[in-house]
């Protein structure tokens, strides 16, 4: 028999541990490689973890409700192949040493049956997963209020589902004749409708306000002639669809140009930490994706400058589909160094986007529209129909001056206008 260690996977650069929410398979069950085996919660998302090998789930080492650091062995998988790598289970059994990397959740204390009506309130040592803690913080739920939430998880643990249901219940129990935080100013009329923000909308609202408070926003605008790109893309979009099974949009072309411009102006690819400027080596471009509920989410294309145009096409489509199907992981949303927003998809010509912290710049892509334009030819100037679009560049004036911010967006426009129409994809 061959045995394999299954470890806690890495789910983002800043995520160093996760909470085991639920084992989807029991010891002794057979599992296929890449089949979901357990659910893990981090401070960003809940996600399912697939099996690294096929075989029998021989032993579960980290139990539900416990926290394991990235790289920690959480289970043993055994299959029939014999490669001489059998492990001695006693050697990898979790130790009781308090310095062990696995953090065991404390069970709620059982109160005496004679206690009063507040007996359901759990003690201050009650365990809460990072995700539950994060939701509580976003929703301004105090520690006392959190302890009153009834948990349906193991040992009464409060799950994501529990806290979401609690929030919904709290909304229904709190009819508000006026809007919160402005009740002395904003009155609600008898024909008005109150729409409560969902959790994502609240997070977006808070982050946008924080960004405006942190960064000194300035915007520059450039109009680019993308006629050659439109013609070239129209030639290849059917070919790519039939050959690769992938939609071929303008977005990969724009990302390619932006990644090149970042190489030319690397000081646009920075973050600010107090009075320190952190110059990023990797070019990780986030792209805002509109969800069905109207909210926006920003998955990130890692090392965008190292991907071919076809590679960018596949990555753009993959992340957009995952976003719309609520399948993005914490890693998909992390480590962005520059962001783009395609406001042209909503019919907008230009805009002033808000910077994604801790980045220092964001580019909005406007609609591509046909316009009469002056065309310079060897025989003289002429009027022709051209495809034009506006590029709207917002940047943080604390570290990006008008010269750098303006030259960067002009460089993007120049790259688009000089696009090589002889290339193949």
Image: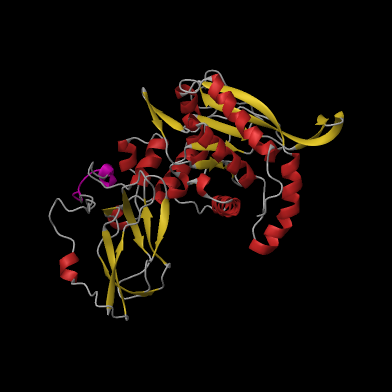
Q: Nearer the viewer, residue 349 or 405?
A: 405
| 326 up-or-down from 383: above or below | below
Where residue 359 appears, as percent x and y from the top left, is: 46, 32
| 42 up-or-down from 209: above or below | below
| 415 up-or-down from 127: above or below | above
Looking at the image, residue 200 sits to the left or right of residue 72; the answer is: right
Where residue 215 appears, as percent x and y from the top left, is: 47, 23
Where residue 377 appears, as percent x and y from the top left, is: 83, 32
- Is residue 40 visible in this depiction of the protein? yes
Range of residues picked out in magenta: 111-121
Is residue 408 rendered magenta in the image?
A: no
Identify the image quadrant of residue 189. Answer: top right
Colour scheme shown:
secondary structure
Looking at the image, residue 55 sits to the left or right of residue 267; the answer is: left
Q: Nearer the viewer, residue 113 or 156?
A: 156
- Is residue 330 visible in this depiction of the protein? no
Where residue 319 appears, as percent x and y from the top left, is: 54, 51
Identify the image quadrant of residue 136. Answer: top left
Q: Nearer the viewer, residue 275 or 59?
A: 275
Residue projecting furthest to the front: 378
The quadrant the N terminus occupies is bottom left
Magenta stretch, main secondary structure class = loop
């Amino acid at each position: 028999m061959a045995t394999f260690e299954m470890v806690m996977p890495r789910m983002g650069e800043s995520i160093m541990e996760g909470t085991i929410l639920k084992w989807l398979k029991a010891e002794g069950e057979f599992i296929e490689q890449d089949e979901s085996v357990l659910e893990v919660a981090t401070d960003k998302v809940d996600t399912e973890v697939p099996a690294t090998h096929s075989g029998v789930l021989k032993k579960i080492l980290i139990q539900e409700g416990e926290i394991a650091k990235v790289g920690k062995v959480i289970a043993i998988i055994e299959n029939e192949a014999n490669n001489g790598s059998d492990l001695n289970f006693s050697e990898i059994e979790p130790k009781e040493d308090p310095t062990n990397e696995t953090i065991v959740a404390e069970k709620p204390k059982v109160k005496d049956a004679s206690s009063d009506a507040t007996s359901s309130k759990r003690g201050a040592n009650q365990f809460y997963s990072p995700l539950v803690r994060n939701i509580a913080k976003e929703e301004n739920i105090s520690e006392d209020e959190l302890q009153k939430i009834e948990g349906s998880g193991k040992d009464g643990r409060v799950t994501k589902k529990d806290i979401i249901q609690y929030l919904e219940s709290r909304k229904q129990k709190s009819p508000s004749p006026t809007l919160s935080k402005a009740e002395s100013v904003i009155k609600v009329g008898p024909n008005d409708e109150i729409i409560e923000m969902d959790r994502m909308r609240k997070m977006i609202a808070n982050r946008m306000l924080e960004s405006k408070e942190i960064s000194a926003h300035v915007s520059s605008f450039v109009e680019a002639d993308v006629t050659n790109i439109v013609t070239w893309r129209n030639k290849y979009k059917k070919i790519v669809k039939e050959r690769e099974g992938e939609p071929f949009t303008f977005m990969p072309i724009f990302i390619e140009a932006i990644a090149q411009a970042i190489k030319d102006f690397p000081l646009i690819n920075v973050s600010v930490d107090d009075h320190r400027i952190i110059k990023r080596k990797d070019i990780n471009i986030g792209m805002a994706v509109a969800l069905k509920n109207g909210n926006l989410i920003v998955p990130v294309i890692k090392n965008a400058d190292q991907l071919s145009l076809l590679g960018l096409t596949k990555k753009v489509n993959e992340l957009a589909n995952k976003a719309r199907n609520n399948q993005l992981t914490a890693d998909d949303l992390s480590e962005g160094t520059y962001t783009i927003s395609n406001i042209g998809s909503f019919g907008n010509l230009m805009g002033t986007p808000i910077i994604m912290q801790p980045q220092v710049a964001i580019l909005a892509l406007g609609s591509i529209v046909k316009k009469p334009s002056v065309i310079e030819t060897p025989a003289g100037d002429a009027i022709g129909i051209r495809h034009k679009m506006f590029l709207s560049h917002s940047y943080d004036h604390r570290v990006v001056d008008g010269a750098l911010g303006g030259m960067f967006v002009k460089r993007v426009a120049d790259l688009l206008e000089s696009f090589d129409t002889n290339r193949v994809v």
